[in-house]
Amino acid sequence: MKLKFTKKAGLLLSIDLLKRAQILLFMAILFTSATTLAQLQTHSDFSTFPRQAIPLYVEIPGSRLAPGYKEKIYTSRNGVTKIKRVSIPQIAIFLPEKSLDGAAVIICPGGGYGLLAYNLEGTDIARTLNEWGIAAIVLKYRLPSDSIMKDKSIGPLQDAQRAIQFVRENATQLKINPEKIGIMGFSAGGHLAATLSTHFEKTYIDNPLNTSLRPDFSILVYPVISLSDKLAHVGSRNNLLGKNPPPELIKEFSNELHVTAQTPPTFLMLARDDKVVNPENSIRYYEELLKANVPAEIHIYKNGGHGFGAYNRVAKENWMGTLKHWMQRNNFIHEKAGENLVLRN
Amino acid sequence: MPTYIWDKKLKMNFKFIKKETLPFLSFINYFLQQSLKPLLFISILVMSVNLSFAQRTIPLYRQVPNSKPAPKYKEKAVTGADGVIRISNVSIPEITIFQPKKSLGNNTAVIICPGGGYSILAYNLEGTKVAEILNSWGVTAIVLKYRLPSDSIMKDKSIGPLQDAQRALQYVRENASDLNINPESIGIMGFSAGGHLASTLSTHFDRAYIDNPKKTSLRPDFSILAYPVISFTDELGHLGSRNNLLGKNPSTEQINEFSNELQVTEKTPPAFLVLAGDDKGVNPENSIRYYEALLKVHVPAELHIYQNGGHGFGTNNKTTKENWMETLKHWMQHNNFIHEKAGGNLVLRN
């Protein structure tokens, strides 16, 4: 059977189809989140690997339509999976086989706010945390870009706030203690983690339940902290704030200036020979925590450079073990957590 | 066969004894064990016998420099309820050399300065106990009993401890081959005020405060600073230590001279710093400033500030499962001060 269409009718139909497609897409997203949550409750072996990542929003706040803007994933020669041009922020939840405490950590991979080192500073870390009985949530946050955001400086922070909001509001289903949710970040992801840790009083997202957006602890690994002229990692700053940002914006996102007594207890780890991010970033943050009497710990290894991930091959020291001890010390995880931990070399 | 080894400590000391002497010792032990009690007395006695084989104590000088005669000034050693041996009124500085059973080929030595606010020396907690662990890594440990600053025994008390530290390093370096030590791998380690002394030695080696006819280098090859006093400035200084070393009203020049964060140069040795953030005795900023000064001049350094532990925890910070001496070992291995395999059999002491 042949059908004849006038031009006008064709146009109307295509618009209609587009609308339907949108609705379908929307429903698909809802469905995936719902099924994933259902799976979380029923499937115990979900812990090993989440098949689906959960999109953070039904409608992404502060976003602009950018049809040509597509996420890119590639693996570089050294085996690091890198994700660029993230426009649909998601979390991937890795639940432990057994948890003694219900602690959870949201992980922000680094990459200078230009990419995400998704396995090295994300899923690889999640696996180790799982072994200690910690639920690990890898955050695929939007990378700041004027093409997809109205205000790119707050895009990543919105996603981090939404991630902790989601995890805390769904704590029961995830078998998580809502008062033991930490944030962990590497490099620029450390900037995001420190920003979340110092900017939780102002919500950059809808927060109808007034859920606390304060992480219970922070783990900052060779982090960018400051965006000041003196200490900033220029690449991260340019990506987040653009070139020549006004002084107020620099101050707003220089997290060493926003530490208060409410800033969460913090673990800082880095190497002295970091040529990418000045170690003074961490030192300043630590000093501010000290001044505010916030419990904190800092380890600066002699060598390791920048971006070594879970294992600093040069130092012979297993910093993740040191982190575990700190978490035990603070009762975030159980004394016996991870006794069967096999060190990865 | 008499059981001449009846406690762990003895067992350890026996490791250092030459085989030939064992039967003789075992006889003494057996005799003592059978005939004399209480045990405590015996073990102390036997230990002192053992010590004469395992370690040597050597006075640093024939004639103590910068000293005044003070016949009534006598050294005291008191053991507190906490088990810490505190020595005060030191007027005859000495070193006690603890040689390892086996050195694994790096032949590194560490001179240890116990702390105690420049008024006592926590001699076991921050001295001999540390030496035991270093020995187990194959490191020769030298515990320095330095003079405690006092106007009654010294002409200029501010330089007394530094003289002793310089002399200790000079002695060890000049006798390196006899001691089976690599003269280019001698470190200084200090706790609290002993950390001030260690950092003073690390930043004041260009000027010899002692006779140095052979022009032996007085620069340590590395520094290990545990919850150290570094600064004597009004802002950061540990006042007790400062008062003891410089007196109550020191001049600005004196303060600056002994504020070691101000004396760091690119020749300052690589350093390892460890402390706790909740140290109420010495402000953690002491270590941070020293670390930052090293960072500026590109001296390799490592900094570990634990969340808890307070001041004076010695080799074991009980507030964490973390063993900082192991972290130190890794740092020394990474720097080739000790062998990759050093201390494989180390038993952790808790």
Image (spheres, coloured by chain):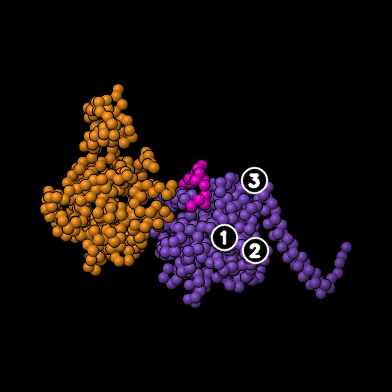
Chain colours: A purple, B orange
Q: Which quadrant holds residue B306?
A: bottom left
Label 1 and label 3: CA atoms lie apart by 29 Å
A333 left or right, relative to B142: right
Residue tagged 1: A83
Residue B158 drawn at (x, y percent): 20, 60
Q: Which chain carries label 2?
A: A
User: In the rendered view of the protein, which quadrant contains the N terminus of chain A?
Assistant: bottom right
Q: Residue placed at 55% from the left, 54% from the top? A: A180
Of circles 3 and 2, which is in front?
Answer: 2
For the residue marked with disc 3, what is the amino acid? Ser
Q: Mark 3 lies on which chain?
A: A
Of circles 2 and 1, which is in front?
Answer: 2
**Mark earlier in primary sequence (1, 3):** 3
Q: Mark 1 lies on which chain?
A: A
Residue tagged 2: A209
Residue range of the region highlighted in magenta in the rendering: A330-345
Q: Main secondary structure of the magenta part?
A: loop
Residue A152 drawn at (x, y percent): 57, 70
A39 left or right, relative to B104: right
B130 left or right, relative to A168: left
For the residue marked with disc 1, what is the amino acid? Ile
